[in-house]
Amino acid sequence: MSTASRFDNMGPSDVLTVVAFWLGALLPLAYLPVILTGLNSTTRLGLFLALLVLHVVALVVGHEYPRTRQRAAR
């Protein structure tokens, strides 16, 4: 099955779940430069906290990704 036809079977909520899953998986990579440059200002601390909140939201929304893949494969 090609990638295009796999995504054709997905609804908007399924696509959101896939995007959220991968965002949740890859977002911790964005923590590293923020932490390495230091959290010594309000702006950097706010950026880190915003990334943390976004990560939690992505994990909650994307937690059903394996089931979404199974539905799309049918």
Image (cartoon, rainbow, N blue to C red):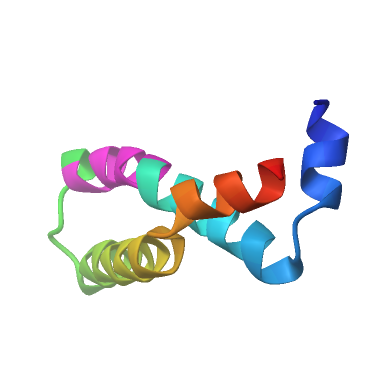
Q: In this view, does 24 lie to the left or right of 67?
A: left
Identify the image quadrant of the C terminus.
top right
Range shown magenta? 26-35
Identify the image quadrant of the N terminus.
top right
Q: Give whichever of 59, 35 is nearer the camera.
A: 59
Q: Residue at x 19, y 66 (%)?
A: 41
The reply to whether the magenta stretch includes residue 52 is: no
Toward the front, the furthest residue is 74
Q: Where is residue 27 in the image (x, y as percent from the top left)?
A: 38, 47
Count of picture labels: 0
Q: Main secondary structure of the magenta part?
A: helix
Q: Residue at x 25, y 38 (%)?
A: 32
Q: Give whichever of 55, 16 is nearer the camera.
A: 16
Q: Position of residue 67 (x, y in %)?
A: 49, 53
Q: Residue at x 33, y 38 (%)?
A: 29
Q: Position of residue 49 (x, y in %)?
A: 24, 69
The reply to whether the magenta stretch includes residue 31 is: yes
In the depicted structure, whether residue 53 falls above or below residue 20? below
Q: In this view, does 44 lie to the left or right of 23?
A: left
Q: Residue at x 26, y 64 (%)?
A: 52
